[in-house]
Image (tube, rainbow, N blue to C red):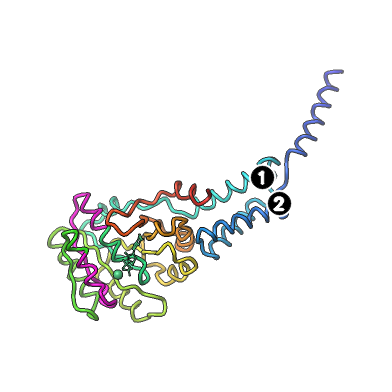
């Protein structure tokens, strides 16, 4: 009898404890925490669109959930972390992808002006060289002043052949000759292209023609980490045209929110991060490490 009474008392006190210990995540609790998270993301240069979508997604998954009173913040933080990890693809193994291509592979670098395409082409040539693969560089930007000389300088410094035509000439023909050289000499063709913007319809048409003629096996979209809200526009402009992303200038903007914006918008993996102007200033993208950093 006394035993049962004790049990009842215990049950009651457990109920009271859990009512005190648990908290429903209502709007009043969530809003300030989500607001804080959104600011953090915006400060890290995540685009407004991506930050708002992440916030909406987390609100939907957490609203009405019951959590331990002491674990409210932890729960929100974990949800943010999970959301970011979900947005980010697992990465892209360029070197394995190259092995899946039968003929000498054709790699394109596309992206807006100044995003770092030419520099990154040179960095990739160096990386491939380090792995015993020879490359030929194609000066497919026949539009921007000095772009051909810039690539030739890199080619000279790295001891790599550069295929170039005149300025204003057809970039698809440059690509064609580059691919031919790669085929004849068993090299990887790395083809640079002119920086396009959405409004340059001619340049966009030229790029599409290059893709049709040169049939790249792997196309990288090169994005500048400082691009902020412009990422959305860039992802739209090149939608469906790239396999993976390279985010440059991470040494200047190490917050790297651009990585989240472009991943969220495109659903494509980030392959590499550029972190300087030297040939070795490029690293594989590690999403776990990146998410830890951004939430610090
Ligand atoms: N700090 C830094 N600068 C970079 C990086 N990648 C490219 N750049 C610089 O950004 C500028 C534009 O690069 P470029 O390759 O010419 O861009 P493109 O117009 O896309 O070909 C150049 O001054 C590069 O040296 C990087 O990872 N870090
Ligand atoms: Mg260039």
Q: Nearer the viewer, residue 165 or 173?
A: 165
Judge the density around disc 1: few (<14), some (14-19), many (≥20) Cα neighbours within 10 Å. Answer: some
* Quarter of the image where the N terminus is located: top right
Residue 89, magenta (yes or no): no
The numbered dot on residue 72 is 1
Q: Secondary structure at mark 1?
A: helix
Mark 2–mark 1 Cα distance, whole angstroms, equals 8 Å
Which residues are drawn in magenta? 124-153
Circle on res. 29: 2
Does residue 143 belong to the magenta stretch? yes
Left or right: 58 in relation to 147? right
Residue 187 sits in quarter: bottom left
Location of residue 174 with respect to 102 vertically, above or below: below
Q: Report the residue at 73% width, 41% height from top.
A: 22
Residue sitting nearer the eye, 66 or 215: 66
Outermost residue to the left:
184
Residue 283 in the image, given as x and y percentages of width and height:
34, 52
* Residue occupying the far top of the picture: 2
Pointer 2 with pointer 1, Cβ within 8 A: yes
């Amino acid at each position: 009898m006394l035993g049962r009474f004790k049990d009842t008392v215990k049950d009651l006190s457990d109920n009271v404890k859990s009512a005190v210990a648990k908290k429903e995540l209502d709007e009043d609790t969530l809003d300030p925490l989500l607001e804080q998270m959104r600011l953090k993301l915006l400060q890290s240069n995540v685009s407004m669109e991506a930050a708002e979508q992440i916030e909406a997604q987390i609100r939907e998954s957490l609203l009405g959930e019951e959590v331990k009173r002491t674990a409210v913040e932890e729960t929100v933080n974990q949800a943010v972390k999970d959301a970011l990890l979900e947005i980010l693809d697992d990465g892209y193994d360029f070197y394995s992808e190259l092995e899946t291509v039968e003929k000498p592979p054709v790699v394109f670098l596309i992206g807006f002006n100044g995003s770092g395409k030419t520099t990154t082409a040179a960095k990739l040539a160096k990386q491939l060289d380090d792995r015993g693969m020879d490359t030929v560089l194609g000066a497919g930007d026949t539009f921007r002043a000095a772009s051909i000389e810039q690539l030739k300088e890199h080619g000279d410094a790295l001891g790599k052949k550069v295929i170039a035509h005149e300025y204003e000439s057809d970039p698809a023909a440059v690509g064609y000759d580059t691919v031919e050289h790669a085929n004849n000499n068993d090299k990887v063709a790395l083809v640079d292209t002119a920086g396009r913007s959405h409004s340059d319809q001619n340049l966009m048409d030229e790029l599409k023609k290059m893709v049709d003629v040169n049939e790249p096996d792997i196309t990288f979209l090169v994005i500048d980490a400082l691009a902020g809200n412009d990422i959305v526009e860039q992802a739209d402009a090149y939608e469906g045209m790239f396999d993976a992303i390279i985010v440059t200038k991470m040494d200047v903007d190490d917050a790297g929110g651009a990585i989240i914006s472009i991943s969220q918008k495109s659903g494509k993996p980030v392959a590499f991060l550029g972190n300087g102007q030297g040939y070795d200033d490029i690293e594989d993208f590690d999403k776990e490490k990146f998410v830890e950093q951004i939430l610090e």
